[in-house]
């Protein structure tokens, strides 16, 4: 899935810089801002962005939130307050949201994550534009996180589920290539003295699912099995 990080009306250069730095830490390639009050290229923004300065310099700026949302397949609002407004989408923790998205959207989907203002967050109307909302479980006596800290928590959860591809993008493995590898493995163990071949096949398939193999890896393993 492609993540589109949209920051609405940020006020402080420090947060702009930190968000750029955190975004680069987790593989975000571009940032999107809506009517920023802070000078995106100001001294503090650049200083706190460290080696992610290019994300600020190449950021796209919108005048309206609605324009920033147009190319998104699903929209995620973020708020420090769990609301009960029926017009708003369901509320999830970041981890729950990632699991929900993994079940309902494919790898070609664009996920828009809308980050609110650093002084007053997103409005109720802005949250109503989103399909679901994320609320981070923090101390109920002081639940409001700095927006850069919220971004870090959210992107970490997406990273755990491998939705952000920070490594070299691999060629997609076609289903018939994977089936060819499985068939080669089955032939390999067919005449072997293995007590529970079904369990062995199951473990091998499990390893493949976790390995994120590319086409070169698949063909190399097929050659080895043959």
Image (cartoon, rainbow, N blue to C red):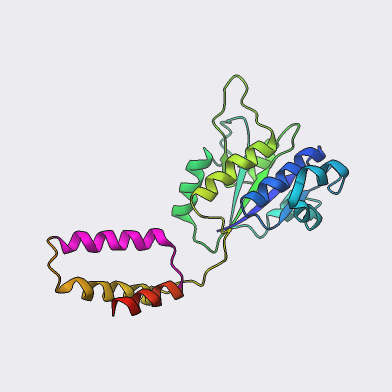
Residue 166, picture quadrant: bottom right
Rendered residue at 24%/64% (across/down):
201
Rendered residue at 74%/37% (across/down):
117
Q: Nearer the viewer, residue 82 or 226?
A: 226
Residue 44 in view, yes or no: yes
Rendered residue at 37%/61% (across/down):
209
Say whether residue 86 is left or right of residue 23: left
Q: Position of residue 109 (x, y in %)?
A: 55, 60
In the image, the segment drawn in magenta is: 196-214
Against 80, is 74 above or below?
below
Magenta stretch containing residue 218, yes or no?
Answer: no
Q: Nearer the viewer, residue 141 or 76?
A: 141
Q: Position of residue 21 (x, y in %)?
A: 71, 47
Which quadrant is home to the N terminus?
A: bottom right
Against 112, is 81 above or below?
above
Q: Main secondary structure of the magenta part?
A: helix
Q: Nearer the viewer, residue 180 or 102?
A: 180
Q: Position of residue 70 (x, y in %)?
A: 68, 58
Q: Nearer the viewer, residue 62 or 127?
A: 62
């Amino acid at each position: 899935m492609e993540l589109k990080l949209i920051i609405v009306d940020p006020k402080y250069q420090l947060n702009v810089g930190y968000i750029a730095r955190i975004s680069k830490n987790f593989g975000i390639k571009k940032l999107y801002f809506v009517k920023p009050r802070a000078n995106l290229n100001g001294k503090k923004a650049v200083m706190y962005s460290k080696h992610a300065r290019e994300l600020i310099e190449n950021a796209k700026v919108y005048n309206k939130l609605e324009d920033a949302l147009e190319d998104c397949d699903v929209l995620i609002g973020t708020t420090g307050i769990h609301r009960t407004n029926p017009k708003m989408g369901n509320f999830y923790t970041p981890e729950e949201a990632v699991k929900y998205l993994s079940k309902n959207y494919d790898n070609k989907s664009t996920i828009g994550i809308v980050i609110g203002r650093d002084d007053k967050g997103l409005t109720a109307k802005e949250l109503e534009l989103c399909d679901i909302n994320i609320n981070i479980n923090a101390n109920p006596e002081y639940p409001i996180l700095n927006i850069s800290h919220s971004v870090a928590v959210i992107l970490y959860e997406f990273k755990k589920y491998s939705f952000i591809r920070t490594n070299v993008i691999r060629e997609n493995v076609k289903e018939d290539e994977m089936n060819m590898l499985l068939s080669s493995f089955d032939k390999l163990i067919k005449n072997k003295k293995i007590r529970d071949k079904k369990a062995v096949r199951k473990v091998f398939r499990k390893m493949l699912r976790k390995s994120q193999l590319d086409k070169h890896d698949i063909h190399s393993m097929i050659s080895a099995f043959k």
